[in-house]
Amino acid sequence: MADVLKPDTAEQVLDAVKWAVSEEVPLEVQGAGTKRTLGRAFQATHGLVVSALDGISLHEPEELVMSAGPGTTLAEIEAALAEVNQQLAFEPADLGPLLGQAAGAGTIGGVFSCNRAGPRRIKAGAARDHLLGLQAVSGRGEAFKTGGRVVKNVTGYDVCKLMTGAFGTLGVLTQLTFKVLPAPETARTLLLFGLDDTTALRALTLALQSPFEVSGAAHLPAAVAARTVAAADTEDAMAVTALRLEGFARSVAARAERLAAALAGFGAEQSLDAEATEVLWKQVRDVAPLVDLAGDRRDVWKLSVAPTGGPAVASRLVESAGAEHYFDWGGGLIWAALPPSADGGAAQVRATIAESGGHATLIRAPEAVRAAVDVFQPQPAPLAALTARVKDGFDPKRILNPGRMYAGV
């Protein structure tokens, strides 16, 4: 990369993008760079780093709202929220270690740009559901803002949702406003042991359909479970099915007892206290069991599927590609690690998804692989045409992260 631009203010961001538009110079937009390798490899002669646009500019605990610059670290935001017993309810993942970066260095801009949400998504929704407003600079070199500081502020096109998950291809974020929620008083995790994938998914479905407000539902096969805190009290490696309950202490205790009774037919159960629960779900959230497998840096995929079809999808990947995997979101999300190969396992993954339905994203692979295969799920022609028109509207000269999501867009 020939040069890196590091603006200190939103006005300097605007100037930098205007210059890039006038010179038709593509920019690689990033904050701390912890997710720089998430997406297709592309060529940009200049970088635009917005890490200096940091700091919490607004926090009104009683209104459950916060504003911050895109370069503000997630660690700073979570620390400020913890002081008033609040949280980001969508539980954003820290994928730094998975992608070869330091833990805790990710920024709030990266969280919303990549729409990262953790295990609580089944209850709280995705990151985009919590973004209230933003300020940004488009690829036309125009500053704009959308949304506001309250939930019901959208009339017409919801640009916040469009920008969230666009991976910096439509605009450079300069300010974000998002909702926060009270943190639970306590949490407990119910564990079931030794279930196969199909039986475990039945247990997760039953729990999620119950009235007990489950906020985390995951299944880890034996090899993966052995790398988590859930295996600390077990002598032999066993598959672990985990269900999290959160809230007031008396409510959690009562719901845990009733949920255990409802799941009695699935075998013996144990439970984790609040401290162990926090550790386990951070491991699940951050894909920690798949970071490194005996020193083997595998290619990692994120597959979104219908929960009922998840076991069959996982089975095919195990048989055809030697994958290791686990389920989150009640079986709707499969994290799969495949042995290194020339295409990152894309042929097997795409064929499996084509048979079962759903979509798959290549999260970790060498740059050469990410340049050669579809990192994101290939789009049908009508949707690809719509994506190109949206890109034309925001960034007609392909200045911002061109090709990071789809070639030519």
Image: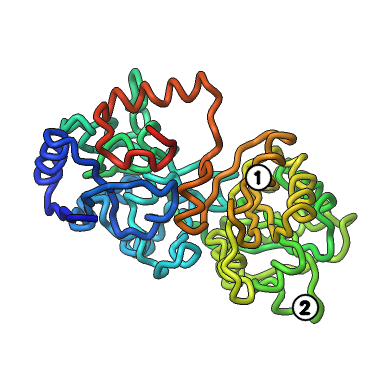
Q: Position of residue 343 (x, y in %)?
A: 58, 51
Q: Residues within 10 Å of mark 1 (few under 14, many from 20)?
A: few
Q: Position of residue 285 (x, y in %)?
A: 55, 59
**Residue extending farthest bottom:** 235
* Residue drawn at x 46%, y 62% as measured from the top left: 99
* Residue 282 x, y percent position in the rendering: 54, 64
The amino acid marked with disc number 1 is: Ala
Q: Residue at x 34, y 25 (%)?
A: 154
Q: CA distance from mark 1 to mark 2?
A: 37 Å
310 relative to 164 in the view: left or right: right
Task: Check the image and report above or below for 385 versus 163.
Answer: above
**Nearer the observer, disc 1 or disc 2?**
1
Around disc 2, counting alpha carbons within 10 Å, would you say few (fewer than 14), some (14 to 19), or many (20 or more)?
Answer: few
Q: Secondary structure at mark 1?
A: helix
Numbered tag placed on residue 234 in the rendering: 2
Please name whichever residue, 237 or 385, is drawn nearer the observer in this view of the structure.
385
Determine which quarter of the picture holds residue 220. Answer: bottom right
- In the picture provided, is 409 more to the left or to the right than 118? left
Residue indicated by mark 1: 347
Query: Residue 321: which quarter of the image?
Result: bottom right
Which sits earlier in the primary sequence, circle 1 or circle 2? 2
In the picture provided, is 31 more to the left or to the right than 200? left
User: Does residue 77 appear in the picture of this structure?
Assistant: no
The one nearer the camera, 397 or 119, is 397
Number of marks: 2
In terms of depth relative to the viewer, which is nearer, 378 or 360? 378
Q: Are marks 1 and 2 in contact (CB under 8 Å)?
A: no
